[in-house]
Amino acid sequence: MISPLAHVDPSAKIADDVKIHPFAYVDANVEIGSGCEIMPYASIIRGTRMGSGNKVYQGAIVGADPQDFRWKGDETFCYIGNNNVIREHVIINRGINHEGGTRIGDDSFIMAESHIGHDSHIEGRCVLGNGVTVAGDVKIDECVILSSNAIVHERCRVGRYALIKGGCRIGSNVPPFVIIAHNPASYYGVNAYVMRRDNRFSDQLVDDAAKAYRHIYQCSTSIYNALKRIEADIDPSEVREAILSFIRECNLRIVGDTFNEY
């Protein structure tokens, strides 16, 4: 299952059924789980720990050296979960410290020419469109969609089920369940279509999200007061608590908050 025209370091730990095509490169100190496929000219660099069922397309580099002056050549890691698709010319950097590392969860689809920086964490079932750029130390929660050429700046967080439209520049935290569009990035609505398709969210929960974000983005009040109104106006639910806890964990700093200037 390994082409004689591929370079696979003898110390790499490769499951028996992994397919490695001609001209692929697998470095030392790499682990690749069962059912993975490494296409021609893809590179899996040292420190990569890859689960099962992943497919890495032509020209992608997984576990590339971090692009950060703080990295001094120490052994660092890139963790890839299961059943991910990593398309052509994607670059995923390792972490800059021995602890932690860059982490990609399960069942994500990372489209061509995207870049994921050091120590970023992407949870499961995410979609990154063509040319998406994710800087270092970014956290992207589950079921997020980043449309083509979106940019997420360093140390930002994107909440679950958020949709960021193509070309948006994200310089703060994106709360869960929203659609963000335009530049400067602004609130565009609730990601109701994806929430309903997932069969986890009833119409009532979708309405709760819409009502919560009316308080946050459309009532010309501070984020602090908006959260108090949400607690008074909306019955407790998974969606309400996810919104409240996310914004408080981010110290009330979120994308598109035009009332407060941080």
Image (spheres, helix red, strand yellow):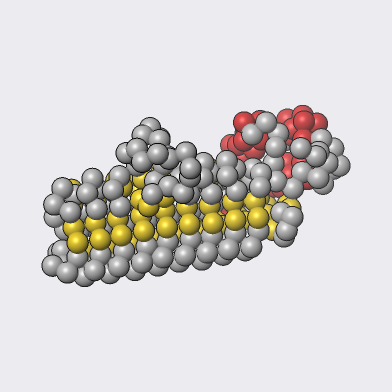
| Camera-side residue of 48 and 110 | 48
- x and y percentages locating residue 136 in the rendered image: 51, 45
Quarter of the image for the N terminus: give it: bottom left
Is 206 located above or below residue 99 in the figure?
A: below
- x and y percentages locating residue 38 in the rendered image: 27, 62
Which quadrant of the view contains residue 62?
bottom left
Give the residue drawn at x 80%, y 31%: 225
| Camera-side residue of 44 and 103 | 44
Which quadrant of the view contains residue 258?
top right
Which quadrant of the view contains residue 35?
bottom left
Residue projecting furthest to the right: 220
Give the residue drawn at x 37%, y 62%: 60
| Camera-side residue of 194 and 96 | 96
- x and y percentages locating residue 114 in the rendered image: 48, 60
Tell me if I can see residue 141 in this picture. no
Tell me if I can see residue 182 in this picture. yes
Give the residue drawn at x 23%, y 45%: 29
80 with respect to 247 (left or right): left
Is 2 located above or below residue 186 in the figure?
A: below
- x and y percentages locating residue 83 in the rendered image: 34, 55
129 with respect to 88 (left or right): right
| Camera-side residue of 135 and 35 | 135
Give the residue drawn at x 36%, y 41%: 73
6 with respect to 147 (left or right): left
Q: How many marks?
A: 0
Quarter of the image for the C terminus: give it: top right
